[in-house]
Image: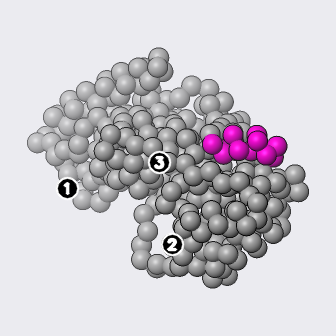
Amino acid sequence: MRDPRSPEPSPLIRSLSAFPEQARGGALAIGNFDGLHRGHRHLLSELRAMANRLGGPSIVFTFDPPPLRLLRPEPWPMPLTTMERRSQLLRSLGVDFTIAYPTDRALLALTAVEFFERILIGELGIGGLVEGPNFRFGRDRMGDVEALQALCGQHARELTIVEPQQDHDKWYSSSVIREWLEQGEVERANRALMEPYRISGIVRHGAARGRTLGYPTANLEGIPVLVPGHGVYAGRVLSLGDSNTLAEAIPVALNIGPNPTFGEGATKVEAHLIGYSGDLYGQLLEIELLERVRAVQKFASKEELLERLKQDVAQVESICRAAERS
């Protein structure tokens, strides 16, 4: 069953050979679109407006993996959203088609002119483009907005350049939101994102210490997106299993980090589902994060820890009730 709060996914196209004829002649935006935020929303509103003028669909062209992952082999940060979730969110913003182009060396070897003429004109038959002022394209990122303007003029294609949006002293961007999440500033990230930040993972066996304390936890592994900085968070479980969407979200106290009280230094992601007593091993949990409750702490005794856990659970329940009312 689909989460009723989630939009239907837009058609996710992973090969240009599968690009439908009815999608030609539309308005296109190119970019990673990782972690759909307010800046993306503003750009996509312009994309919809152009698509309406052209009488065609709105299309987002993104890359899987991002080109820089092929060009620079160093470790890269985890994404903010999976490609499938990104497609769903784009659909909710009015995007008709999402292309997740399988990035390869052949694509990266194309010059700006070749990319524009072969891919955008030849393969996609675009009617126009919507981009930000820092857009770069083509081999070695040599193509810029001026080059794009010239090519659109030569091929009689419409072009709209959208100014970025700002949050006080920061421009909205996926890298800025990633920075906030790494610092545990979930609330600030959520104000920039179009939905509360989500993580998902498979429940695996842990030390089972939480159960002996009266606060059983689900140990999450295989999380495909960025894990926020260490701390205790208030959140809600949206689904159990691949298709078992919950009719009502379950409040969750989520601990991210080590367990210094018991001398454990490894970072773990442990979720205490408040009021839930079922068997979760092997299940896929999807959790949205609402607020950071506190930092990870070392407690002097088991009794001190239990008293803090009691306070955490009460605070999480209060935060979740407020979120339901908002």
Q: Is residue 285 left or right of residue 156?
A: left
- Percent coordinates x, y for residue 141 in the rendering: 53, 74
Of discs 2 and 3, which sits in the foreground? 3
Residue underneath mark 3: 164
Of residues 65 and 118, the one drawn nearer to the viewer in this rendering: 118
Q: Callout 3: few (<14), some (14-19), or many (20+) C-alpha neighbours within 10 Å?
A: some
Task: Quote the CA–CA distance across marks 3 and 1.
Answer: 46 Å
Task: Check residue 48 for magenta coloring.
Answer: yes
* Magenta region, residue range: 46-56
- Percent coordinates x, y for residue 111 in the rendering: 63, 79
Of discs 1 and 2, which sits in the foreground? 2
Does dot 1 land on a helix, a strand or a loop?
loop
Does dot 2 land on a helix, a strand or a loop?
helix
| Prevailing secondary structure class for the magenta stretch in the rendered image | helix
Of discs 3 and 1, which sits in the foreground? 3
- Percent coordinates x, y for residue 229 in the rendering: 32, 51
